[in-house]
C-alpha cells in the first residue's frame, strides 16, 4: 500500500504559499500597474530606458562579483587550513567562522564605520607610518563596501566548503602523494575539485547576500554610490512610486536569479556531482 | 582462459617495466621488476599511543606477502609506513639495497591501492590511471594508459567516471592507477574487502595471475585469513602492534607459534587445562572438565602450569561410545558443509568445541546422537601458556 505523504507536507506548502509565493505574486502584479491605474509593461520600459537605473543594476551585479572574488581569495587559504587541521583545531576554526554571525549585520556594519572612519585605527596607522599626511576617512567608496561585505559574507562561503571537506576522503590526498604529486599539484588537481561543490554553493549565498545587503551598502557606500536595494528604497520611501519599485525589485530578483541559476547548473556538472 | 592478446600485453608490460634500479641490482636478463623490501625494527606511536612496535620482516623480490591481523592491530599503519605516508618514530624501511625511511611517499616509487580505492571522483578512468604519469610526454602517457586499460580489461570504460563503475571495476582501476608509474613495490590495503563474496574469489585469482605475470613485489593487508592464504606466499600475522609469526600459509596453519595465531589462522577450539606431569618423554593434561588426556610428547611446561589446548576441528574425533581418553560432549548443532558435517559441541564445563566429520548422505542431523565422546588427536593439538585473563 502506498501511503500518501501529502498530509505531512501540507503545512509547509501552505506556509510557503501564504508567506512567500503570495507576496511575490502581489509584488509581481504590482510591477505591471501603470500610474493611470491600468496594467502594462510601462514600469519596465521606463526602467530599462533609464541610464541611471541600468548603471545601478550593473553596479549591483558587479558588486556581487567583486565580493565573491574577495571572499574566495580570503576563504580558500582558510579552507586549506581547515583541511590540514586536526579535529580539535577544526572545531575551533568552525567556531571562529560562526562567531561573527552571532552579531547582527547592522552591528558589524557600524563596527566597520569606526574602523574605517577618520579617527579609526586604519587612518591612525597609515598616518603614523607616514603614508597619508593627515587623518582621512576610508568610508563612502565602493572598495570599502566590497571589503566590509566580504568580511560579513565570508562565513557564507566558508561553511559550505567546510561541510564538503569534512566529508571528503583523505585517502585521495595520500593516493595523489604515492602517485608522485607535489603539494601544489594536489591542491589544484585534488583539493580544489573536491571543494568545488562547496565553493559554488558558497558563491551563490555570497552573491545573493551581497547584492541585496541594504544596510551595509547604504551605510558604508554612502549616498554617492547607490545599489539596487537603495534604489528601490528611494522609489518607495522618497518618491512613493510603489509600482516602479516593484518593477525594480523584480529586475533585481531576475538578474541575481539568473546568476545563481548559472552557478547551480555548474554545480550539477557530472564531474562535480560525483561527490559532496 | 584469457585470450592470447591479453597475455601478450601482460608480457609486454612486464618487459617495459624494468626500472634502472633493478637493472643495476641484477645483471642477469631475467625480468624481475620488483624490489625486495626489508622492514627493520619499526615502531610508531600516535600521540604516545603505540600503534606498531618493533616490527621486523623482509619480503623477497617478486613475491606476495600478506599482513594479516584483526582490526586495530597496526597493519594499516605498517602499510602507510612502507608507503612513506607515515614517518615511523623508530626503525628503517629498505627497498632493495636503499634505505628509504627518509624518502617521501612522492619519491618512493611505491604503488598503493587503498581500501576504498580512493579514485579521484572528478576524473575519468583514463585520467585516474594517467595521474601518476605527469613526467611523460603526451604520447607516451597515452600509450601507457592504453596498455594498463588493456591489462585490467577496462578499455570500454576508459571515459567513465568512477561512480559509474561497479566495485570490481573500481578495484581494477585502482590497481591500474597504482601500476602505471612502474612502481617497484605494490601495496594493497584490504583490496577485496568491499567486494561481494563471489566476485572476491574471482578478483583474487585474477590478481594473483596479474602479479605473477608482472613479477612485482606485493604486500597486501587483510583481516581475512582465507584471503591471505589464497593470495600470499608469506603471511605476516600481526596482533596488538607486534608481529606474532611469519611463515607460509601451511606453516602458520600447521605450526602456529602462539594461541593467537592458532585461533586467528583457521579455527581452533581452546580448552583450559593443567599440566600433570613433566620431565618424561610424555605429558598428561588435566582438562577443566576433570578428564585427563595423554600426550606422546613432552608439552614443555612444568607440573601444575595452567595451559590452553588448541584443537582444530579436524583434530577432534567423534565416537558414539565411551572409550579411554575420550571426553563427554553434548551436541548443540550440526551444519552440513558440502561433504562435511560441522558439529558444535559443548563440554561438561561449558567449553565450546567445533568438530568436522565426513557427512553421511541422507542422514538428518536430528537423527544424530545428542552426545558424543570426543578424542583429541594430541599429536596434532598445540599447547600454549594459558591466556592471562582465564588463569
Image (cartoon, coloured by chain):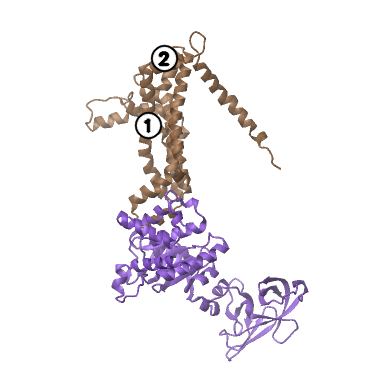
For the residue pair B383 and A164, the one nearer the viewer reads as A164
- In the picture, which chain is purple? B
Residue B233: percent from left, percent from top: 47, 74
Mark nearer the viewer, 1 or 2: 2
- The answer to whether any part of residue B86 appears in the image is no
Q: Earlier in the sequence, mark 1 or mark 2?
A: 2
Residue A87: percent from left, percent from top: 46, 50
Give the structural element (helix, strand or loop) at label 2: helix
Give the structural element (helix, strand or loop) at label 1: helix
- The answer to whether any part of residue B160 appears in the image is yes
Residue in the picture at 29% in, 68% down: B20
- In the picture, which chain is brown? A
Residue A238: percent from left, percent from top: 43, 13
For the residue pair B225 and A80, the one nearer the viewer reads as B225
Q: Quadrant of the C terminus of chain B?
A: bottom right
Numbered tag placed on residue A65 in the rendering? 1
Q: Which residue is mark 2?
A: A46
Amino acid at each position: 500500500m502506498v501511503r500518501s505523504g501529502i498530509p505531512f507536507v501540507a503545512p509547509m506548502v501552505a506556509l510557503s504559499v501564504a508567506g512567500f509565493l503570495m507576496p511575490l505574486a502581489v509584488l509581481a502584479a504590482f510591477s505591471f500597474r501603470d500610474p493611470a491605474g491600468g496594467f502594462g509593461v510601462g514600469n519596465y520600459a521606463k526602467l530599462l530606458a533609464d541610464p541611471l537605473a541600468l548603471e545601478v543594476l550593473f553596479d549591483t551585479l558587479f558588486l556581487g562579483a567583486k565580493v565573491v572574488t574577495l571572499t574566495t581569495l580570503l576563504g580558500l587559504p582558510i579552507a586549506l587550513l581547515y583541511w590540514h587541521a586536526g579535529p580539535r583545531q577544526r572545531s575551533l576554526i568552525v567556531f571562529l567562522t560562526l562567531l561573527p554571525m552571532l552579531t547582527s549585520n547592522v552591528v558589524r556594519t557600524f563596527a566597520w564605520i569606526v574602523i574605517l572612519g577618520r579617527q579609526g585605527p586604519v587612518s591612525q596607522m597609515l598616518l603614523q607610518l607616514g603614508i597619508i599626511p593627515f587623518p582621512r576617512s576610508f568610508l563612502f567608496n565602493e572598495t570599502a563596501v566590497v571589503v566590509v561585505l566580504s568580511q560579513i559574507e565570508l562565513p557564507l562561503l566558508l561553511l559550505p566548503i567546510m561541510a564538503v571537506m569534512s566529508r571528503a576522503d583523505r585517502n585521495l590526498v595520500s593516493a595523489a602523494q604515492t602517485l608522485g604529486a607535489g603539494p601544489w599539484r594536489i591542491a589544484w588537481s585534488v583539493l580544489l575539485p573536491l571543494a568545488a561543490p562547496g565553493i559554488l554553493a558558497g558563491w551563490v549565498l555570497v552573491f545573493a547576500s551581497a547584492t541585496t545587503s541594504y544596510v551595509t551598502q547604504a551605510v558604508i557606500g554612502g549616498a554617492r554610490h547607490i545599489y539596487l536595494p537603495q534604489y528601490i528604497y528611494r522609489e518607495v520611501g522618497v518618491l512613493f512610486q510603489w509600482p516602479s519599485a516593484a518593477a525594480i525589485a523584480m529586475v533585481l530578483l531576475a538578474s541575481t536569479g539568473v546568476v545563481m541559476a548559472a552557478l547551480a547548473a555548474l554545480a550539477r556538472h557530472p564531474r562535480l556531482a560525483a561527490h559532496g | 582462459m584469457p585470450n592470447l592478446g591479453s597475455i601478450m600485453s601482460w608480457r609486454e608490460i612486464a618487459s617495459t617495466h624494468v626500472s634502472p634500479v633493478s637493472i643495476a641490482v641484477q645483471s642477469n636478463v631475467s625480468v624481475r621488476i620488483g624490489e625486495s623490501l626489508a622492514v627493520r625494527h619499526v615502531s610508531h606511536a600516535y600521540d604516545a599511543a603505540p600503534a606498531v612496535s618493533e616490527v621486523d620482516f623482509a619480503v623477497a623480490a617478486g613475491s606476495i606477502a600478506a599482513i594479516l591481523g584483526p582490526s586495530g592491530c597496526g597493519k594499516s599503519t605498517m602499510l602507510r609506513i612502507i608507503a612513506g605516508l607515515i614517518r615511523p618514530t623508530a626503525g628503517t624501511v629498505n627497498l632493495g639495497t636503499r634505505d628509504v625511511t627518509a624518502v617521501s611517499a612522492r619519491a618512493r616509487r611505491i604503488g598503493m591501492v587503498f581500501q576504498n580505492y580512493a579514485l579521484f571522483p572528478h576524473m575519468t578512468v583514463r585520467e585516474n590511471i594517467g595521474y601518476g604519469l605527469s613526467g611523460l610526454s603526451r604520447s607516451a602517457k597515452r600509450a601507457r594508459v592504453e596498455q594498463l586499460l588493456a591489462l585490467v580489461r577496462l578499455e570500454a570504460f576508459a571515459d567513465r567516471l568512477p561512480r559509474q563503475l561497479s566495485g570490481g571495476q573500481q578495484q581494477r582501476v585502482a590497481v591500474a592507477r597504482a601500476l602505471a608509474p612502474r612502481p617497484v613495490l605494490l601495496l594493497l590495503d584490504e583490496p577485496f574487502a568491499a567486494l561481494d563474496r563471489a566476485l572476491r574469489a574471482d578478483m583474487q585469482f585474477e590478481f594473483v595471475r596479474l602479479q605473477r605475470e608482472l613479477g612485482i613485489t606485493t604486500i597486501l593487508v587483510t583481516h581475512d585469513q582465507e584471503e591471505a592464504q589464497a593470495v600470499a606466499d608469506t603471511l605476516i600475522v600481526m596482533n596488538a602492534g607486534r608481529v606474532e609469526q611469519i611463515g607460509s600459509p601451511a606453516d602458520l596453519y600447521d605450526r602456529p607459534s602462539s594461541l593467537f595465531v592458532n585461533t586467528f589462522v583457521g579455527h581452533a577450539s581452546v580448552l583450559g587445562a593443567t599440566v600433570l606431569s613433566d620431565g618424561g618423554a610424555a605429558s598428561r593434561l588435566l582438562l577443566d572438565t576433570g578428564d585427563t588426556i595423554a600426550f606422546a610428547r613432552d608439552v614443555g611446561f612444568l607440573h601444575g602450569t595452567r595451559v590452553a589446548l588448541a584443537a582444530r576441528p579436524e583434530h577432534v574425533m567423534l565416537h558414539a561410545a565411551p572409550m579411554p581418553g575420550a571426553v563427554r560432549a553434548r551436541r548443540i548443532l550440526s551444519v552440513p558443509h558440502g561433504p562435511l558435517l560441522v558439529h558444535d559441541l559443548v563440554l561438561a564445563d561449558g567449553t565450546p568445541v567445533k568438530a568436522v566429520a565426513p557427512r553421511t548422505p541422507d542422514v538428518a542431523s536430528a537423527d544424530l546422537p545428542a552426545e558424543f565422546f570426543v578424542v583429541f588427536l594430541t599429536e596434532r593439538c598445540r599447547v600454549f601458556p594459558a591466556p592471562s585473563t582465564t588463569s
